[in-house]
Image (cartoon, rainbow, N blue to C red):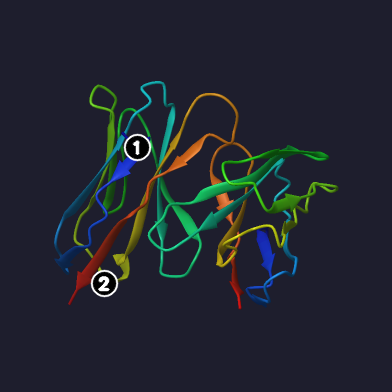
Amino acid sequence: DGGITQSPKYLFRKEGQNVTLSCEQNLNHDAMYWYRQDPGQGLRLIYYSQIVNDFQKGDIAEGYSVSREKKESFPLTVTSAQKNPTAFYLCASTGTGELFFGEGSRLTVL
Amino acid sequence: RKEVEQDPGPFNVPEGATVAFNCTYSNSASQSFFWYRQDCRKEPKLLMSVYSSGNEDGRFTAQLNRASQYISLLIRDSKLSDSATYLCVVNNPGNNRKLIWGLGTSLAVNP
């Protein structure tokens, strides 16, 4: 079955640590996205990539980094520079319009 | 004015009721419109795209009013399983990243 796989589903991190969230898709989509969702807020775009080896900052990129070395993979690193990293992180991809989402990764900083 | 605005609700309705949500958008050049459904602590899933002529999928009807810059979602014969948050999404002209998300409208269907 085609889809988007995010891992881990739940992650706890100590302050000052970097953490990398995985996102893999087998939908053959060119475009991939990372969103962050906080309670009571809409989805906010962190980074997006429209093609391999290229990515762009979204609205809240500070404290995050990404890479797009393969079409299928778009990992997100939450660095220690991100001041409020506790959130629900959603990876998505699109071919011709509809966004497909992974199940999300819930990061908690202790 | 926010780019995309929705009434946050919550809407509490009995089973079998008809409920309607509106979503207004600020950019008159917006081209594509969607309704997504998000269950608690889950990822959003596409409910339906919204076409200029309006479209229907079973108990769900979506409409677009370009003159007044809003889209609507009508749910007929509400089921308990319809309880969720409904997100309005607008795709503005330009590159793919310009998907603007509303904050969502919460619906609770009660027995």
Image position of B67 (left or right of B88): left
Q: Is residue A6 above or below residue A100?
A: below
Residue A83: which quarter of the image? bottom right
Residue B26: which quarter of the image? top left
Same chain letter for marks 2 and 1: yes
Subunit ID for the residue under disc 2: B
Between A17 and A53, the one lying in front of the other is: A17
Whether residue B10 is visible: yes
Q: Amino acid at mark 2?
A: Leu
Label located before the other in sequence (2 or 1):
1
- In space, the residues marked 2 and 1 are separated at their CA atoms by 31 Å
Residue marked by disc 2: B80
Whether residue B64 is visible: no
Q: Position of residue B103 (x, y in %)?
A: 37, 51
Name the mark on residue B2: 1
Q: Position of residue A28 (x, y in %)?
A: 73, 46
Between B34 and A53, the one lying in front of the other is: A53
Name the mark on residue B53: none
Q: Is residue A13 above or below residue A76?
A: below
> Going 67% across and 58% down the picture, which residue do you hit?
A2
Residue B63: which quarter of the image? top left
> Going 65% across and 48% down the picture, which residue do you hit?
A62
- Tag nearer the camera, 2 or 1: 1
Q: Position of residue B80 (x, y in %)?
A: 26, 72
